[in-house]
Amino acid sequence: MTRDWNALPSANSLWEATAEPARAFPVLSGEQQADVVIIGAGYTGLSAAHHIAKSGLAPVVLEANRPGWGASGRNGGVITAKFRLSFREIDASHGRAMAKRMYEIAHESTDIVEELVSEFGITSANLTRTGQVKAAHNETTLKAAIDEANWMTREMGSAEVRILDKRQVRDETGSDIFVGGVLNPGSGGIHPLNYLRGLADGVARQGVPIFQQSPVIKLQRENGGTVAETPQGAVRARQAIIATNSYSDLTGATARMQRTLIPFRSAIIATEQLPRNLAGRLMPTGRTYTETKRMMRWFRMVDNRVIFGGRGAFGEQDSQAAFDALRKAMIGIFPDLADVPLAYKWSGLVGMTLDSVPHIGRIDDRTLVSMGYNGAGVAMSSLMGRYLAALVRGETPDVGLLDVSRMKAIPLYPLREPAVRMVAGWYQFLDAIGR
């Protein structure tokens, strides 16, 4: 596959506009030797590099564009201790012990973000742990959210979950359309690109070589190790980590991983800064918020701007129709924003898996992978870097349902996009009729 790597578009995002200056990394030229070559300089790859280097091994990171160009710099900056598959569903299908282990992994993921921010002094990440409210749009979904919260308290020991009535959710959000909700205190928000750039800077200060504009065009076995070739160089290593997630098809070297994912484009809009009186009425607690519709929307306040996002964009590029749908949904929740202009709109790819959980592990004796974060990747990908380092050292961490042996290829892969459109259309219909 031949691409003009300098021509790949950046996100017209609030994060790009407000991020700390990016550290300049060189292009790989010539040959490098390493214990581990890491493909992808997002959260997964940089966290893996950090933890591998702390183990006394020598990693090298190769990035096709620049650190944070992909999902790590395009997401909404929401940190949650969850999977797309609920813990109650895990308990029903796999037993209580597995549900508890997955609960532990989820909470370890949010904790590690705080640890990394502290360890590298990334104050510009503006990390908060003020919690997330799931706001219910009708009595049926409220009952389901309350049942889930009560189950979590009873069976997982999640004593901090709180049930909110209509008035409390109105006070939380500034919106009258919700009938109640549930508060999960452990969640939070972050400036995702500043977090990413802080990780990259910290890893570089550890002495780890990071090369940008260095796409891996070939990954092959050689003399008991592996070789990652780029247009102008190569890295010879004992092991390789593929950390490319939904952007695995940028080159043929990692494209086979794409067949395990359903890339789903997630769109985000951000308003101009609001007048102080209006900003004070909307989301005054600084939490993050989701709604209970199937085509879930999420929202948060950052720097007196409303950031509003959700699924529903399709194709390889930004979609004006998706942005228009988001703005309409935003105004439906917050009518006072009808006359507030949008300042930014952008999108990125979410890696969805057939079983709704990420996967990590060895795909052969020299290659490891972690991907498929299903829309909750800021925290989970940070944690998977720690687990990848353990696997590189020959350890066998308990990753529960995330073991790569459970990863399934997408059946009828060429039909994935029309299938996603069909499912999304059905969900939109159910949401429209209040089901």
Image: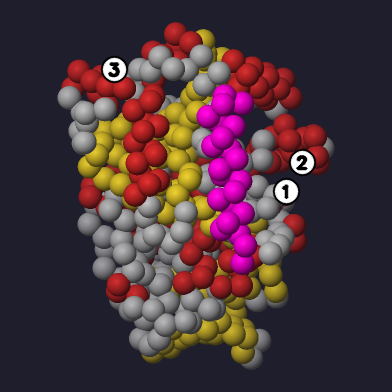
Q: Which residue is mark 1?
A: 400
- Contact? badges 1 and 2 (CB < 8 Å): yes
Q: Is residue 135 left or right of residue 232?
A: right
Identify residue for label 3: 281
Q: Which residue is located at x 40 percent, y 72 percent? A: 64
Q: Residue at x 42, y 54 (%)?
A: 348
Does dot 1 land on a helix, a strand or a loop? Answer: helix
Decide: marks 1, 3 in contact (CB < 8 A)? no
Q: Amino acid at mark 2?
A: Met
Give the percent coordinates (x, y) of residue 181.
Answer: 53, 18
Helix, strand or loop at label 2? It is helix
Estimate the spatial distance between the alpha carbons at disc 1 and disc 2, rounded to whole Å.
6 Å
| Principal secondary structure, stretch drawn in magenta | helix
Number of on-image labels: 3
> CA gap, disc 1 to disc 3?
42 Å
The residue at which mark 2 appears reads as 98
**Spot occupied by residue 297 in the image (x, y as percentages of width and height):** 46, 35
- The residue type indicated by label 1 comes to Gly
> How many C-alpha atoms fall within 10 Å of the one at disc 1: few (<14), some, or many (≥20)?
some
Which percent across, then down, holds residue 183? 52, 21
Query: How much space separates mark 2 and mark 3, taking CA atoms?
Result: 42 Å
Q: Secondary structure at mark 3?
A: helix
282 left or right, relative to 252: left
- Report the span colored magenta: 414-435
